[in-house]
Amino acid sequence: MAKPRLPAYLGGEWVSARCEIRPLGLFLKRHLRFHVGDRSWHGEYRFYADPVCSVPTFTAAASGRYSRSPTPSSKVEGGIDFDFRVEHASLTILDRGMAQDLQGDSRCIAGGVWKVGVPRDLTPSRGCAPLGIIVPSTEYELVRVEMDAQGNPLLLMGQPDTDNRKRGPRDRPTAYQWPLIHCRSLPPFSPNHHHYHHPDDDVQDNHLFPIYHARIGLQSSGSGSTGVFTSFFTFALACHTARAVIFV
């Protein structure tokens, strides 16, 4: 039985339901936020060294604006074409070996000094050449929203390729990644505020509050799953082939 399809409304927060696998031995969890009022987006992609996402190696983050096509995808039934503009990016290294590999390389950050656990802004350097990161840039995406058997909204983003070639509007994905689960809606954007405020933001931790059915789904797919991230960042040893493996 086919899953019910919903309009491609991205507003709110979406998270990985399990540890996801990528080519080149990469594992990760995604966390995406979309504000429909000003069409802005923010993504965090935490990568791990193991298939159960228990040993973090680095966190990549990006943000910018997005736009959508007024018509359905001409290549994939039920899909909608979206363009995600990457205007800001940062990288937090969580693995000492990776920090040593990038130490002294000023192509990512001025001075090339990296410390484990300290976020570094890649925007002034226009990205990070050793990792294939380019800022600004545009990711040409395929998006679909559907509903699972429990009534949870699911967000499907295009499956990234691994051929390391520059993609244009005609080179969008034709398959999807593992779906993201909707966590919560965000208040409408207000031009009088630099950011939104949610009651949950008063809690000083990074805990998300999924809707009830989604919470059950996250619990049931936890530690027992080995899991099956726009394709944007990648681990240092595979950087020359993996730019398309990481973002949105």
Image: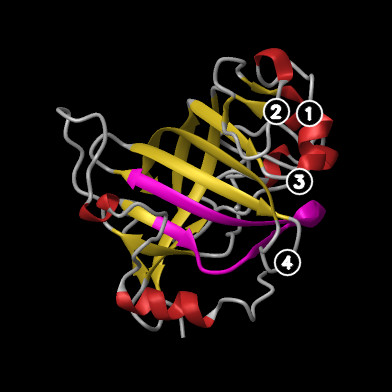
**Of callouts 4 and 2, the N-terminal one:** 4
Q: Amino acid at mark 4?
A: Pro
At x 16%, y 34%, the residue is 190
Q: Amino acid at mark 2?
A: Trp
> How far apart are the two marked residues, 3 and 1, measured between alpha carbons?
22 Å
| Quarter of image, res 234 | top right
**Of callouts 3 and 2, the N-terminal one:** 2
Q: Main secondary structure of the magenta part?
A: strand
Identify residue for label 1: 102
Pointer 4 with pointer 3, Cβ within 8 A: no
| Of marks 3 and 2, the one in the foreground | 2
Which stretch did the figure color magenta?
14-34
Q: Mark 2: which secondary structure?
A: loop
Pointer 2 with pointer 1, Cβ within 8 A: yes
Q: Mark 4: which secondary structure?
A: loop
Front in this rendered view, residue 101 or 161: 101
Q: Amino acid at mark 1?
A: Leu
Q: Position of residue 68 (x, y in %)?
A: 38, 41
Q: Is residue 218 left or right of residue 59?
A: left
Q: Is residue 13 above or below residue 68?
A: below
